[in-house]
């Protein structure tokens, strides 16, 4: 295993939900990201995966919990003290239309991180570096002075990626980077992300609701449900022998693009996720879990090894 | 012979733009036979939703239908007045939209909204309306229908809202239902439930037209599929032939893209380039700019839909007529 | 056939890769400022006429000495209160001065008191609005409570008090009008900033490590510009009106300088005998204010992102 890069310990974050109530987006999550790996973070909408991604790079402050970067405590320090780490922790956003300032040219967009950190000595040098970055992400150099709206979604996402890799970060949080794109374009971006990782050796935290995308890109996977991690493990183990019932239901629910296999044979999860405002007691999944017992309703299951993965379940592997 | 619920012939929808006119729907012909589910699959901007809107009579100015026929059970829809269309929508043809939040009125109780459809299109006595709505809520799998009847849309989850929309779409037993990306906004586990529900929507004398970008959804629901690209149908076939033996380079590319992701190939297959701007379509095949086998002929001459097998048509110069 | 190369060159040929959905509804096409103004010209002839009126006013103010043979202070007591004639197009006032001449010179002051305070309050209001919205917390509360107080006091009353304390004169008029108008600008720019602050591209800039001041300058300010243009055009007429009222009350520009408000004030006593003394500057004020309002509305229709009809 590679060296530990980033570690979150017991991270929690609530948001005000009106009427004095709280939305529990992330509850007591501990997570490790190693050097050079891709950690996939999957879960359904509202499970807190985006919040967790932002907590890990301090784009959001946790209510409680600690954050370590290469062994240094980086939570609880002032924004100014954290600033040097910012350069190493970058992000790619979901919406390639909203994440680029419509009034800036491609050159200025990609130069922005370089200028903010005074990476290059002169304006010419910066432009040269911008062109090299454009080449690396596959945007033709002649588009240097164009504005974002003159590009397709896929190309905009490439520009977003160029911005993220400009500072040679150690970790990029990819927040649903391909879910706004069409399949054929989505694959181009996934290939690009893989290629960049091979050449530059950074780690990804890849947040997605799409299980097949995560299957392809991740080395390890963490499955989230309602602000908690249900199961983590190597991608192969999670997809082949999931231990947590939620992981299994989630994997079964994906429609297979094969009409020969469309007969409904698998059991489906009943109902819908409970509201993150009123979390169920005990295991957060128990209201939807067909195997739930009295213990599940009262006692929060701890994360522990189960089969080849780790699962937060009192009865891992039940079926 | 089976009869068709919906027949579209050579439909053209045109939008004026700063660069002349664009055709998001270009010479589209399709059939929805009784008792069948037909799919239109394609990437964003291919014209699939616009085709559905044309059937619903919902093309707003400055867009307009310039040519073609749309027949619902033999009745020419293009000859209808706006008033006649209004009485048709909801009763004989209905639509399930992608976004369950915005397609319900936020200040009206869910039950009342469904009731409204009944009140408009049927003469069921006022006293029975509520019971009808509760029955249909039960039929689409809404738990505690009496309680949900009095809920406002924001009090319902995404899945429940989509069920309310489906209830609203089917309560008058329309001949044709159109589902435009019905599960795109939903979570996987909820999507699976809704897909299962939608499989049972079609009866012997009704049809369902499903529009989706997701080959998984199409594979799950449809009997027959049309593949659209840049406003045109490029391939049509029954579901099994399409997935087993796709012919058009675009369909192949799409299948490969999805397939390589599932196989977890080292490098995923992609379709090079981007979807061309509708304002800059080549004179010939719209896909020729991205096609590996594109020739000068492809660029200049528009291929017709060539029959390559029973019920299998492909718009590509590389195809040979079946039997030749 | 050299297929590999061939197909590559084809891919390069794809014209402007525009966003596909946008192609369907060409309405959403991202437009440059020029295109938007062109659209306004086509759809809103009133705004174009207004722009033309304003242009004529500006030309009149600039070329006043060339356009009229008279001096705006030169008395001609034999010709007091002359009715409009070929020699004096709009007649003369109680001192025998040509009214057209005084109107033209007065437009200099009216336009200046329209534009300068509108500009100053725009700068002040935008700066405080962006700061308030972006910084939040105590800074925000402080600036906004100050703005609330300014907005709570009737602006005319406030202007009168300030002018009374500081005394008349053009400089003090500018200062007063700026103090009266900045709060409205600040509130609107603040709400705009709050919206922009939550956009993904501002978050993206924060991730990159761009400093706060730079985010305000490069990401928030440029995206406020359309709103600022609209606010600017809509603030001009209110400044002109306030100045006219102040001068009318004797608190603004002092005689013998010509100001439209002052002219109405002077003509008041002759309302029945020589009505043109009041009517001519009155109509001038009305036309100018309407022209700026119509132009502002027209600009808002095409520039304001919140009013975009789609």
Image: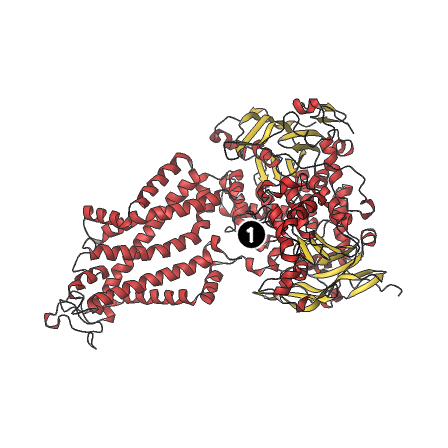
Give left or right: position of C236 versus A156: left
State which quarter of the image contains the N terminus of chain B: bottom right
At 51% from the left and 39% from the top, the residue drawn is C206
Q: Quadrant of residue A294?
A: top right
Place of residue C186 in the rendered image (x, y in percent of width and height, measured from the top left): 37, 46
* Position of residue B258 measured from the top left corner of the image (x, y, whole percent): 75, 47
Q: Could you tell me residue B222's position as x and y percent?
A: 77, 52
The color scheme shown is secondary structure
Residue C148 falls left or right of residue A9: left
- Looking at the image, can residue B130 be seen? yes
Q: Residue at x 13, y 72 (%)?
A: C79
Q: C104 or A197, which is in the foreground?
A: C104
Work out which quarter of the rendered image holds the C terminus of chain B and state it: bottom right
Numbered disc total: 1
Residue A252 placement, left or right of A121: right
Q: Which residue is mark 1?
A: A148
Letter of the chain that mark 1 sits on in the rendering: A
Residue B221, percent from left and from top:
76, 49
Q: Nearer the viewer, residue A73 or C167?
A: C167
Quarter occupied by residue A38: top right
Vertical comparison of A69 with C185: above or below: above
Q: Secondary structure at mark 1?
A: helix
| Label 1 environment density (alpha carbons within 10 Å; few <14, some 14–19, many ≥20) | many
Where C41 falls versus C169 (above or below)? below
| C132 to A70, vertically: above or below | below
The residue sitting at the right extreme is B323
Residue A120 visible to an observer of this rendering: no
| C154 lies above or below A175 | below
Q: Nearer the viewer, residue C20 or B225?
A: B225
């Amino acid at each position: 295993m590679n060296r530990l890069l980033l570690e979150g310990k017991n991270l929690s974050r609530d948001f005000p939900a009106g009427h004095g109530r709280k939305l529990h987006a992330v509850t007591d999550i501990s997570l490790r990201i190693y050097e050079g790996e891709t950690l996939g973070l999957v879960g359904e909408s509202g499970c807190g995966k985006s919040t967790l991604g932002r907590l890990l790079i301090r784009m959001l402050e946790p209510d409680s919990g600690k954050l370590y970067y290469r062994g240094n405590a980086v939570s609880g320090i002032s924004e100014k003290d954290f600033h040097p780490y910012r350069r190493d922790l970058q992000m790619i956003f979901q919406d390639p239309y909203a994440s680029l300032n419509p009034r800036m040219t491609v050159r200025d967009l990609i130069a922005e991180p370089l200028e903010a950190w005074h990476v290059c000595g002169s304006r010419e040098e910066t432009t040269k570096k911008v062109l090299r970055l454009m080449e690396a992400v596959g945007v033709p150099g002649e588009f240097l002075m164009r504005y974002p709206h003159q590009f397709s979604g896929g190309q905009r996402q490439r520009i977003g990626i160029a911005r993220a890799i400009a500072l040679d970060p150690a970790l990029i949080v990819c927040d649903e980077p391909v879910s706004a794109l069409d399949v054929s374009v989505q694959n181009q971006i996934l290939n690009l992300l893989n290629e960049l990782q091979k050449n530059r050796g950074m780690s990804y935290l890849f947040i997605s609701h799409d299980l097949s995308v995560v299957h392809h890109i991740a080395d390890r996977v963490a499955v989230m449900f309602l602000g908690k991690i249900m199961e983590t493990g190597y991608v192969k183990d999670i997809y082949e022998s999931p231990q947590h019932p939620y992981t299994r239901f989630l994997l079964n629910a994906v429609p297979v693009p094969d009409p020969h296999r469309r007969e409904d044979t698998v059991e489906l999860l009943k109902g819908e996720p409970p509201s993150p405002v009123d979390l169920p007691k005990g295991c957060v999944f128990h209201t939807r879990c067909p195997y739930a017992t009295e213990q599940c309703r009262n006692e929060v299951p701890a994360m522990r090894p189960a089969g080849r993965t780790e699962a937060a379940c009192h009865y891992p592997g039940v079926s | 012979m089976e009869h068709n619920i919906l027949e579209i012939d050579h439909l053209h929808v045109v939008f004026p733009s700063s660069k002349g006119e664009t055709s998001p729907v270009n010479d589209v012909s399709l059939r929805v036979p009784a008792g069948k589910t037909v799919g239109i699959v394609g990437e964003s901007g291919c014209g699939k939703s616009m085709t559905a809107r044309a059937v619903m009579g919902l093309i707003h100015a400055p867009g307009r239908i310039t040519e073609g026929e749309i027949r619902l059970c033999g009745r020419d829809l293009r000859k209808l007045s706006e008033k006649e269309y209004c009485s048709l929508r909801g009763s004989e043809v209905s639509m399930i939209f992608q976004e369950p939040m915005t397609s319900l009125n936020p200040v009206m109780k869910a039950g009342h909204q469904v009731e409204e459809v009944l009140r408009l299109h049927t003469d069921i006595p006022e006293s029975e309306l509520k019971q009808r709505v509760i029955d249909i809520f039960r039929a689409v799998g809404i738990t505690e229908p009496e309680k949900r009847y009095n809920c406002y849309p924001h009090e319902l989850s995404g899945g429940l809202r989509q069920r309310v929309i489906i209830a609203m779409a089917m309560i008058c037993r329309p001949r044709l239902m159109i589902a435009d990306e019905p599960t795109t906004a939903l979570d996987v586990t909820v999507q699976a439930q809704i897909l299962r529900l939608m499989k049972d929507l079609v009866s012997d004398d009704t049809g369902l037209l499903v529009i989706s970008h997701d080959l998984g959804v199409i594979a799950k629901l449809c009997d027959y599929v049309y593949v659209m690209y840049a406003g045109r149908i490029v391939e049509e076939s029954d579901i099994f032939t399409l997935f087993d033996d796709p012919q058009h380079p675009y369909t192949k590319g799409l299948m490969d893209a999805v397939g390589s992701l599932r196989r977890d190939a080292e490098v995923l297959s992609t379709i090079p380039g981007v979807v061309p701007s509708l304002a800059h379509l080549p004179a010939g095949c719209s896909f020729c700019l991205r096609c590996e086998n594109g020739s000068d002929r492809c660029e200049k001459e528009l291929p017709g839909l060539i029959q390559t097998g029973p019920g299998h048509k492909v718009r590509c110069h590389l195809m040979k007529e079946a039997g030749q | 056939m050299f297929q590999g190369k061939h197909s590559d060159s084809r891919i390069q040929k794809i014209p402007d890769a525009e966003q596909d959905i946008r192609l369907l509804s060409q309405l959403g096409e991202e437009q440059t400022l020029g295109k938007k103004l062109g659209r306004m010209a086509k759809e809103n002839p009133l705004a174009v006429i207004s722009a033309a009126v304003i242009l004529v006013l500006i030309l009149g103010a600039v070329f006043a000495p060339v356009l009229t043979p008279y001096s705006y202070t030169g008395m001609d007591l034999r010709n007091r209160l002359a009715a409009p004639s070929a020699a004096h197009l709009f007649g003369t006032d109680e001192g025998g001065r040509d009214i057209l001449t005084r109107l033209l010179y007065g437009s200099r002051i009216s336009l200046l008191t329209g534009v300068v305070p509108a500009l100053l309050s725009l700068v002040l209001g935008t700066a405080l609005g962006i700061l308030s919205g972006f910084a939040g917390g105590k800074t925000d509360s402080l600036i906004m409570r100050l703005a609330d107080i300014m907005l709570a006091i009737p602006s005319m009353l406030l202007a009168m008090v300030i002018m009374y304390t500081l005394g008349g004169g053009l400089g003090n008029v500018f200062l007063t009008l700026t103090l009266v108008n900045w709060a409205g600008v600040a509130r609107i720019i603040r709400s705009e900033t709050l919206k922009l602050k939550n956009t993904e591209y501002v978050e993206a800039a924060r991730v990159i490590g761009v400093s706060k001041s730079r985010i305000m300058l490069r990401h928030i300010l440029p995206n406020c510009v359309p709103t600022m243009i609209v606010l600017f055009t809509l603030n001009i007429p209110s400044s002109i009106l306030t100045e006219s009222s102040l001068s009318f009350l004797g608190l603004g520009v002092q005689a013998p300088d010509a100001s439209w408000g002052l002219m109405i004030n002077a003509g008041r006593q002759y309302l029945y005998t020589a009505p043109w003394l009041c009517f001519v500057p009155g109509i001038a004020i009305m036309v100018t204010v309407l022209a700026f309002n119509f132009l502002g509305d027209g600009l808002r229709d095409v520039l304001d992102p919140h009013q975009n009809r789609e």
